[in-house]
Image: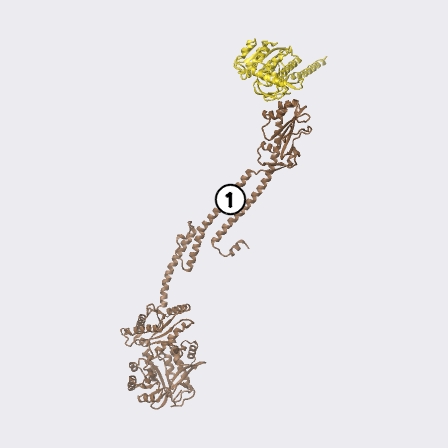
Chain colours: A brown, B yellow
Amino acid sequence: MGLAAIARRLPPRPIAHYALALLLVLVLALVVFAALVRHDTARLQEQVARSDEMLARQELEEAIVLLSRQVDEVAGELVQWDEARQQLDDPTYYAYWRNVRVSAAGVLPVSGALDGLDLYDRQGNNLSTDRRGEAAMPAHVDTRDLRPFLRHESGRDRVYFFHPFYQDAAHTVVIGYAGIRYDFQLGLDQLRKFRYLDIDSVHVVSREGEAFPLEGVLSALQLKARANPETRALEEIIIRSFYEMAAILAVVSLIGYLALVSAVTKPLRRLSDHIEGMRRGTGGMLDASYRGMLAVTELENVRQSLNDYQGQLDDMHLSLAGKNRELWALAHCDPLTGIFNRRAFEDDWRVMRRASNEKVLSVAFLLFDCDHFKAINDTYGHQVGDQVIRSLAESLRSGLRVGDRLYRLGGDEFATTLISVDVDGARQVAERCVEQVLNHDFTALGVKEPVRISVGIAVLEATGDGVLQQLHRQADIAMYHAKRPGQSKITVYTPEMGAGQDVLVSNAETSAVFEAMVDPGRLEIHYQPVLALAARRVEYYEALVRIRTARDLIMPASIFPLVELRGLETELDLAVLERVRRDLEAGRIPSGAGVALNVSGPGIVNARVIDKLLDFAPLLPACKLVLEVTETSLITQIAQATANLNRLRKEGFTIALDDFGSGYSSLRYLSNMPVDLVKFDISMVHSLERPGRQAVLVEDLARLIRDAGYQLVAEGVESESLLQRVAALGFSHAQGFHIGRAAPLMAPVASGRRDAG
Amino acid sequence: MKPRPILVSFVVLASMLMAAPSFAAHSGTTEARLPNGSIVGAKFHAGNRGRPAILILHGFLQTNEFPTVASLTDALATAGYTVLAPTLSLGISRRNKSLPCEAIHLHTLEGDAAEVGYWVRWLMQKGYSQVILVGHSFGNLQLLTYLGHEPAPVVKQALMISLTDVEVKQNASERAQLAEDMRNRVKRGDRTLVETEFGHCRKYVAPPVALLSYMGLSRSGILGALARSPVPTIAIMGGSDDRMGPDWIGRLSARGIEVRVVPGATHFFDNQYEFDLQDVVLRALSGR
């Protein structure tokens, strides 16, 4: 694997690491270079030392030769000196001559090295008669061997030279000898300057008094080479130069490193951080302070490019932010009212759910719904309906506290969440909202009927354990209760309400409802008898829908809120009609008895439902078919509903207005509708048993409607007395537990039997 | 007879070859062993046999290489004279350098005169029948000493250049006192070297007996010896010789000594006076 391949596999590092690595490499190179220089210097020193020692030995050898020559010259002068020869002839005053004249005559060199001189006669005997003291010359000289010799004496090395005196110029007759002694080291030292030889180190290895011939003394000498000043100077220059160069390199490297850090590393890091900031979205314009003193063109270009890019990003960001705001507004605001829409509600709901996981909150959820808005919309048109919606939004917003957010969840349904509010506080807010709506002048929109709202409130004292997600369902249930006739328009959820309303949110029950609508065989129709008071017989049965599941029986109170919430009224109508048709075909309806079919508001105006009803037409001659519709359902698309009802009526269907007295109970609607029967709501029927004006009003109303040609059906007849009363009032039919409970018809039912079910 | 010319030519040539070493031997340096065993040397130049041989003696403690003597030797030799310029041994065998004042002076005046006599005899042995003695400075006193002790009859004349007055540096009383001291030392056998002022020497080292030999010299003794000289004697003095007293030449003249003065010359007749001296000497020799 090549170095480049290894390098490529390394993870990325900050440039400062590479700069430090470069610095370390430089330092390492310096250290290696220093070691090499030191090694080479040591080797050079060793070579120079060897060379110096050789040169020193050579110098010593030359010096010894030179010393010998010098002594020869001295001896030559001496033997030529008349006064010396005079002593050989007559040594009477030899002592004076040696001690006084020799030094005073100036014939011999003035040198401390020449520390001994004596003359010897031709037999080799010293002329001196007094040779006391260490410096005394030998008493006798071997005239056969006059070679100079070196002798170690009293710690000093001395060289002895002996030269003959000749009587004649031809050197044929010896008349005596001159003995000269030199201090070896001193003599050499005074002889010349030594460049390589350390003269003080020169000594002969010998015993005291041992003599060596001078010509072979070199091998017996020990010496040391003088530290070569030039080599030393050169070495010092090399070392100093190296350290200077190392210092310069170190300084240059440090400056280079700092310059690299200042000019490249720091700006690159800033650029990297800046790019990272841009990636995180926190980038801005990078000013010139990102760099050090030195500017690098390429980095400047990068900075300019980044700034240009950042500028473009900022522009794009601003543009996107504007677009986002617009999109957010479009996505989160209701275009009709300007308040928050369902999406905003869901977003805020998620935020609150997350907040509730971190902090315990007390939350109130308020659902607002306009009563009979469909009727208003259908009566006055969509434009008015939209204006009503806007007015409702405006009124509700004015009823909320500052900071509370109002959402339009859809149609005429509004909602708000109140944080840190208890039940009373939530109720106060709801009452203000209801009051604001009541106070609003809807007549300015042309709406003559009073516009009211129902409010469902669910309050959670303390969030946690996932209870927050139930708040919406609870408010739904409370709203459902508020919508019920006779209930307060502001209803706070209680657990008791939830028992029958679980189907709203129960997945299992919801599935059962959906499956039943797909497969009408899953529906279970309970038939409640309706008694014809004049004939005292069950004239027909009201078909009441149930859904049988594996566990229990789902009642209408649970079915219809879900169906209405999902907008599945038409599908339920179709399924129920199919199921009743099958029952009729199966003969479960007693012969001669009719069936009352409940059709929803949307079903009345739905062609498929009408067609389905028309499928029952062949049965009409033998079977009475009553079509029960509610006042509220008729208000929606009243024209189409009226047309459809007229068509069915012509086919033979009997039209019954259901739950009369629970809603507007508008006589104007009643008069305009093709209705044959008017079913008084159970609340109105029950009021007949209570003293007061309401009973009188009901009696008068029954009488009025009867007189107008309608047949009357009393619901909720649960006693014989009430049966008698309604009969007395002219009701043509009665229905209730006293007559018979709703129950499945498994076999033909005997006519006239009251179902106690 | 044809062979005869060849034989004659051979004999002549052989005679010439044999004569050549003889001639060469008489030019240059010669040495001689004195009776006491010392070897003495002299410059010898054999000149014209018809002319007297010249014996030139150097000054006190000098050698025959002394410039005044050497130049005069060469000049006389050039002039055709046989010249012998010995170097007195002064007690040192083969002495060839001037002897310092501080050296140990074992020589005596008598010994010096004896060496002069030796060389005169040497000339005589060489066949010279006329010898003229020429001295310089103190050498004149050694010549006078020789002349005062029955000189050889071949000595015909004496030329005394820069004749020394021994009492210029030491007056008579000082010399007498020193002489007395030396005599006493000799009497008591004291051979210890004496360091004293003598002649031009500030420190003259000699045993008493040797020093005493020179103490016999005196101004009056010199003048008397000159007067009693057995040979004609001419004194040649430098006009500017400051080593002598201003009245020395007058004293000489007063004693009937012929004095020839070279004006301006110093004691050593150096510089241009070297040639004046040679002229005076040659004239004196030719005018004999």
Determine the residue positioned at 55% across, 44% down.
A38
State how many labels appear: 1
A387 in relation to A210, above or below? below
User: Quarter holding the N terminus of chain B?
Assistant: top right
Residue A547: x %, y % from top left? 42, 81
Q: Quadrant of residue B179?
A: top right
B98 in relation to A721, above or below? above
Q: Quadrant of residue A500?
A: bottom left
| Residue of label 1 | A243
User: Quarter holding the C terminus of chain B?
Assistant: top right
Pointer 1: residues within 10 angstroms few (<14), some, or many (20+)?
A: some
Residue A369: x %, y % from top left? 34, 74
Q: Quadrant of residue B89?
A: top right
**For this rendering, which residue is in front, B274 or A723?**
B274
Residue A462: x %, y % from top left? 40, 71
Residue A490: x %, y % from top left? 34, 76
Q: What chain letter is assigned to the residue under label 1?
A: A
A147 in relation to A513, above or below? above
Q: Do we see residue A11 in this rendering?
A: yes
**For this rendering, which residue is in front, B243 or B157?**
B243
Q: Judging from the image, what secondary structure is the residue with disc 1 in?
A: helix
Q: Do we see residue B76 in this rendering?
A: no
**For this rendering, which residue is in front, A682 or A521?**
A682
Which residue type does callout 1 highlight?
Tyr
Judged left or right of residue A414, residue A214 is: right
